[in-house]
Image (cartoon, grey):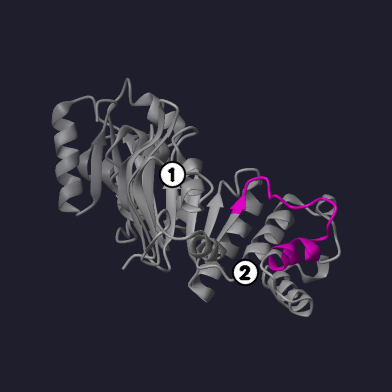
Amino acid sequence: MALLEIKHLTKKYDEKVVLDDVSLEINKGDIYGILGLSGAGKSTLVRCIDSLEDFQKGKISFNGELLCDCSKKIRRENRKKIGMIFQSFNLLAQRNALDNVKLGLKFNHVERKEREKIALEALKRVGLEKEKDKYPSELSGGQCQRVAIARVLALKPDILLSDEATSALDPETTSSILALLDSLNKEYGLTIIMISHEMIVIEKICNKVAILDQAKIVEKGNVSDIFLNPKTEIAKKLVYSDEVHSSFKKNRFLRIVFDGNVDEPLISKIALDCKIMVSIEYASNKVVDGKVFGQTIIRCPKEEKDLEKLKKYLNNKKVRFEEITHAN
């Protein structure tokens, strides 16, 4: 049984549909990415999961219980098991780091002595025990986000919802926060739902992903599968660089994906073995779902016979590739 199950969820603001027949299954221990451009419905979906928004149709089940049908008491208890972090941190400026973490424990009627102990342990786990007396204005953005994570961690949730929690941070700080979330997932079995508009965030930490576009889920599955073979236009836009994606309109390309099994300089070998000069449009190495992948996008040869020779060569080498144009 899935830890969190969403079936045919539909949400409207007046006549505007912001979630259209959304269905997902999220299992315990998943780091599940919800990916899409601004306005796709990502944050609204998270707010529905956290019972901060009502919806018109569909069902959300948590631990086998329907969130919309259960009593207020059960809903309140379920919400204790779902924590949330935000882009803006949502810390109280007039309280220090320790008191910000203790606040959630106070609202959950934890005894005063126990609050101090639990909050200190949570701050230690995120590496901020020495900053416990500092106020948000004295902390960096990354440190503020760690305090927010500690505040959630202190409540021992089953699910952590991360709503664009790294989008206001620099790349180095983003990587450190993602590494922290990944370690919490592995250490505690914490299920994490990552909302982001950046594929690079999803690639680094998630094992599964759903892509939202115009209120609908257009693709979902393992992150590595979506990375290797994006099918929809929006998925390709998110997986490829903007520069390369925009050039699809006027050129044909081959996207060659390396999964660690290629142990020779393939592009150089193409030029030598096929007597075909290739132009590299884009190349990168990525760690996707814990595995190292590389991708190289090359401009297709102008002569059709050269293109067919190149494809045959790649097939013989058992190299994964696809032809990409604006049409597909």
**Looking at the image, which residue is at 28% across and 46% down?**
229
| Residue sitting farthest toward the top | 250
Q: In the picture, which quadrant includes the N terminus?
A: bottom left
Rendered location of residue 127, percent (x, y): 71, 69
In depth, the one of 142 and 59 nearer the eye is 59
**Looking at the image, which residue is at 64% across and 61% down?**
149
Rendered location of residue 135, percent (x, y): 84, 56
Whether 88 is among the magenta residues is: yes
Left or right for 51, reference 299: right
Q: Which residues are magenta?
A: 85-106
Q: Could you say which quadrant of the image residue 21 lies in?
A: top left
Residue, disc 2: 155
In depth, the one of 291 and 120 nearer the eye is 120
**Considering the numbered disc 1 on the image, is that residue within a helix, a strand or a loop?**
strand
Rendered location of residue 61, percent (x, y): 38, 59
Q: Residues within 10 Å of mark 1 (few under 14, many from 20)?
A: many
Q: CA distance from mark 1 to mark 2?
A: 27 Å
Whether 282 is among the magenta residues is: no
Rendered location of residue 94, percent (x, y): 85, 53
Q: In the picture, which quadrant includes the C terminus?
A: top left
Amino acid at dot 2: Leu
Left or right for 178, reference 131: left
**Looking at the image, which residue is at 73% across and 64% down?**
101
**Considering the numbered disc 2 on the image, is that residue within a helix, a strand or a loop?**
loop
